[in-house]
Image (cartoon, grey):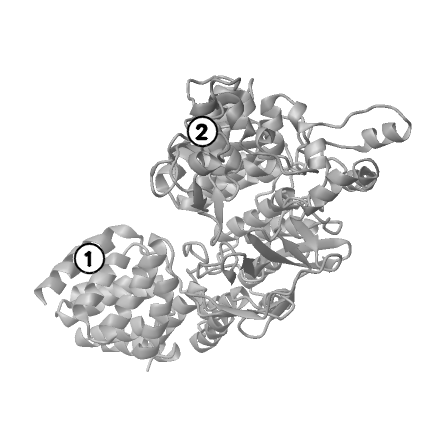
Amino acid sequence: MTRTLAVLGFALLLVSGCRSEGERQDVTDVTRESFPAESPPQPVAPPQPVAPPSPSPPGAKAPDWQAIRAAEEACADCHPDEVEAWRASPMGRSLRSLITAPDRARGPAAVVHPTTGERFTVDAAGSTFAEIGGLSRAASHVVGSGNHTRSYVHTHSPSADVYRAELMPLTWYRTAGWGLSPGYDVPDHPGFRRAINLECLTCHNDPAPTAPGTDDRFTAPLADGIGCARCHGDGRAHVTARLAGKASPPVMPDRLPPDLGADVCGQCHLQGAVRLLRAGRRWDEMLPGRALGEVVAVFARRTPGAEIGIASHAERLRRSRCATADPEAGRCTTCHVPHPTGERPDRSAGCRACHGAGASDTTDGAKPDTHGLACAGPGGADCAACHMARSATSDIPHVTMTDHFIRRRPAAENARGDTGPLEWINRPAGVSDAVARRLLGRALAESARTRVDAAERDRALALLTAALKEAPDDPAAWADLASMKTLAGDPAGARAALEDAVRRAGTSAARATWWADLARLRLQTGAVDAAATALASARELRPDDPDDLLVAARIAAARGDARAAEAALAAHDRLRPEVADGHVLRGALALAGLNPPAAERAFEVAAAREPGDPRAWLNLCRLRADRRAWDTADIACQRAASRARGADAVARVAGARARVALGRGDVEQAADLAAAAVRAAPADASLVLGRLAAKAGRLDDAMGLLDRAVRLEPTMADGWAALADVLRRRGETALADRAAAQARRLGAP
């Protein structure tokens, strides 16, 4: 007990300084990312209008990919062998329709998610996928050549002439059979709703046109595979000239300057740690012959590690002495022939051209080593086998690739991954340092979001704040600044930054997303009418978005319109019947209406829909703790703990677990957990510490803590019951009766 009292004393100091009495913690505090606050309806604040968007920056124009693709039908007339070889190549088979080119049957199969227990199945044809609850989706396209993987895509038309594409949760791996798709091994995986956007499509296929203000609403069906133009440019002038008997040569990557030739492949194979569109650019505007860095800025870590990504070829090659000493060695076509029409060429020929044909052959006419590095291997050896390691990829499971970092003896470096600061590795000549600093700020913001890195967040905040004072016309930079302010716990600052983003959005493909995010931030800061205005702008551009319907439901609830809120939630459920989001919000609204039984039912449905979603389990744990149903509360807490990601999420779960531990009689564990949860879950921590103080006879401390708990969380039935007990022990019978009545009203036993 002495140790428990010591922990209690320390925790009391933390509680006294962590939050003001007027700040509430709500059971709806759990969302997918790292459990940021899901606030209850707020008072209406005056609307904050945003000025009309400024004109879009000049130069951002996509080629007419459909017309270019149509002209390529004539390529096979003159180049039949090349076209046939390309169509058989991995890139030519990068994406295709299952209707025009049915996939070889690979099912049936079932895969159980290792964390959530969900069971995903695929039918005998390998094209229809189902998950827990019987929901199924039919695949329309397959992504990947099958050399390593085949992933599957479901397309649908939510409205006339609009197509959406979503990745299926199962992938076929050549070395392992069926398994979870990349990125699905986490509890909060996206299920059947991982959207494929223009950035995805420009590496796996030819781009498709998109609806204004969006990057994942396509206005034409997806093409089959990467076409000729991605390497040879817009061929329409060439086709027209040849039909007229004239010359108009296409772009030939091996005849471009080495850096521009490498950029043809770098469109997809220069991935880096972060890839960013430059201001005013589009993912689908890149054509061969242009510097990739003019459109896309690629950032990599300064120090190379041992891990490689599946699209790291060009980045790793750039680190090699071969490429730094000889620009021709950095040209991909030095070793690779994308569509060989005869006998497959010797991929080591380029190596021998510089390094000799082996120690025994260097005297009979071989080109002398130009870098002072003669190879002692046999003349006919495969150079890559010794100097380019084979390695598992860090981003795609069950796949092994060739590491393009060429060294004398590939050695064990940092066993994890690249380290050090981010550097812009494809910065074109003539770019100002001011532009580079702004892009570095954006790159750090992207990395901070992915890695949940506070140091990178703070550096991104500093760089972006300074850069936007100097040059404020980059809407994406404003949006990144807003996200960093959100991570830093500054919703008002985030809202102001995002208002700057939409003010300058012009024709940006991200502006629908920014409007929707602004609606959420305005709602969070109490500007309900202004939130509705922002949401209307988002829905005008994308009327079919389920997440926007959730925001509409919250706005309706904030206005006290329960019927409109339920109508929005019902519309969301029709579009996304498999997800928990609508039911989590129903539970939150039920709690706001002081109806814990209805809230518990809603969270139970949410947990059944998405067992990997931590929000439902945490809320169930807390509600069951209110009822003192310790066994079922403990089960829900354990499931929430196994799914929690990030320090705040873990701490919130610790607060709920503290209540359960105390209820089950484990006083020391309850004290430890409550102390760990003081900042992230102050209501739960105050309840547990208050009950511990009461148990120790410190009624004044208990009174203050329990009063704080119910002020922070008025729906906490267990808190009102504990407060009633302390009030009765203090002789304040009338107040005790009122607290006990509130506890019974909220469902306390």
Q: Judging from the image, what secondary structure is the residue with disc 1 in?
A: helix
Residue 436 is at least partly visible in this image? yes
The residue tagged 2 is 319
Quadrant position of the C terminus in the picture: bottom left
Q: Residue at position x 86%, y 29% from top?
A: 242
Foreground of the two, 740 or 588: 588
Can you tell which mark lies on residue 281?
Answer: none
Q: Quadrant of residue 461?
A: top left
Placement of 320 over or under 223, stated as above or below: above
Horizontal and vertical percent position of residue 539: 66, 53
Specify the farthest residue to the left.
2
Amino acid on which disc 2 is placed:
Arg
Horizontal and vertical percent position of residue 204: 63, 46
Quadrant position of the N terminus in the picture: bottom left
In the displayed structure, does residue 46 sit left or right of residue 341? left
Amino acid on which disc 1 is placed:
Leu
Can you tell which mark lies on residue 12?
Answer: 1
Foreground of the two, 309 or 137: 309
In the displayed structure, does residue 457 sit left or right of residue 584? left
Mark nearer the N terminus (2 vs 1): 1
Q: Judging from the image, what secondary structure is the residue with disc 2 in?
A: loop
Q: Residues within 10 Å of mark 1 (few under 14, many from 20)?
A: many
Foreground of the two, 228 or 189: 228
Contact between labelled residues 1 and 2, with CB atoms less than 8 Å apart: no
Camera-nearest label, 2 or 1: 2
Residue 629 is at least partly visible in this image? no
Q: CA distance from mark 2 to mark 1?
A: 54 Å
Horizontal and vertical percent position of residue 703: 22, 66
Placement of 707 over or under 513, stated as above or below: below
Placement of 749 over or under 232, stated as above or below: below
Horizontal and vertical percent position of residue 43: 49, 56
Placement of 242 over or under 603, stated as above or below: above
